[in-house]
Amino acid sequence: MADLSLNVNGMKFANPFVIGSGPPGTNYRTIAKSFACGWGGVVAKTVALDDTPVCNVAPRYGKWRMKAWEQRKGNANVIGFQNIELISDRGLSDWIPDFQRSKDDYPDGVLIASLMESYHKDRWQELVQRSDEAGVDAFELNFSCPHGHPETNMGAAMGQNPAMVEEVTRWCVEATDKPVWSKMTPNVTDITLPARAAIAGGAHGVSAINTILAVIGVNLDTLRPMPTVQGYSTPGGYSYYAVKPIALRMVAEMILDNPELTVSGIGGVGDADDAIEFMLLGARTVQVCTGVMLQGHKMVQKLIDGTAEFMDRHGFNSVDEFIGTSLPYFTTHHDLVDRQIAAKAEKAGQKKRDMEWSENISQETDNLTTN
């Protein structure tokens, strides 16, 4: 069977599949379940310091289906998923024992702490240092939550400012010897700019993409936007299958801009084919969050089996052998036009040569018959 293990920033992953930060890794129990099911790594739900106010509302999720499927129940028909859920409502002090227990019980699993704070150096560095002491393997800096706390420059409000991304990344890198990934927001015009800023700040890699700010829809009976809380709503983070094309494009853009960049790909992964596409475009690990929420933690087995089958079919012995294989085939639209013109000219030339050859053979045959 193909070898799915790989080394990323000095961390050994049993496979490239990682639980993305969110409900599937919201406490020790869910983290333990993830490792027991076979996930190569877990990015825990984003945590802040104890005094950062976090108050969730309900309902906070919305699903989008093709119109023909709207009346059908269950998750099999969900195309898009929106949430207005905030980061963990458990402060860092509550998380420290979970980090410690997770590493004690699953020492070979890669545990990554997701961190988010306001624009203050001491707060970010405290988060990093205390999580480091609890034994986590790496850090993911959440510069990308699309809703909640923008007034303190948290989440996407910070991630949309490359200067802040670089500075805060540097603060965190200074506070630890462990790998640091900066998580990118897709809610920008050019994702290469914050990615460059993160690397300039010392990040070992980036994660992308987080959810896309969106409105899932409007209830045509009540005329209220959804999800509706006490008659009102707010734009939230959009995920699952519908965002994959955008995520693939942004991952490719970042790596084409910086071929040495380590990327953890995120966005719309529901099966092995989806994950493989991210890796073919250069992602070294692939994170899944909404897929796990809708399919369950055991979905990792179909990711493993499907990727192993793909590797066997193409003769790849390791994941490293096919990561980035499809990137060289991106070019400009102008070049596509030139290539098509050249191909048509070559085809026309070959047709002419074939006709001339046929005419020559016919002439030679006529000569032999006459003689």
Image (cartoon, helix red, strand yellow):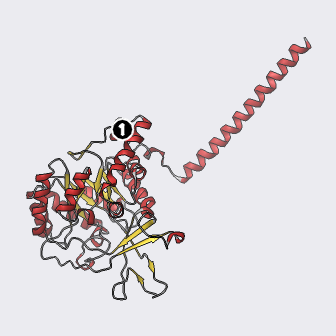
Q: Nearer the viewer, residue 249 or 67?
A: 67
Find the residue positioned furthest to the front: 73
Find the residue positioned furthest to the right: 370
Is residue 257 left or right of 22 when viewed as pictured?
A: right
Does residue 351 sit above or below 11 in this rendering?
A: above
Quadrant (top left/top right/bottom left/bottom right) for the C terminus? top right
Q: Is residue 339 visible?
A: yes
Q: How many marks?
A: 1
Does residue 351 sit above or below 56 in this rendering?
A: above
Find the residue positioned furthest to the top: 371
Q: Secondary structure at mark 1?
A: helix
Does residue 263 sit above or below 148 in this rendering?
A: above
Q: Nearer the viewer, residue 352 or 111?
A: 111
Residue 342, image x and y in percent?
63, 42
Residue 113, image x and y in percent?
19, 60
Quadrant (top left/top right/bottom left/bottom right) for the N terminus? top left
Which residue is at a point 83% across and 23% down the rendered structure image?
Answer: 362
Report the residue marked by disc 1.
321
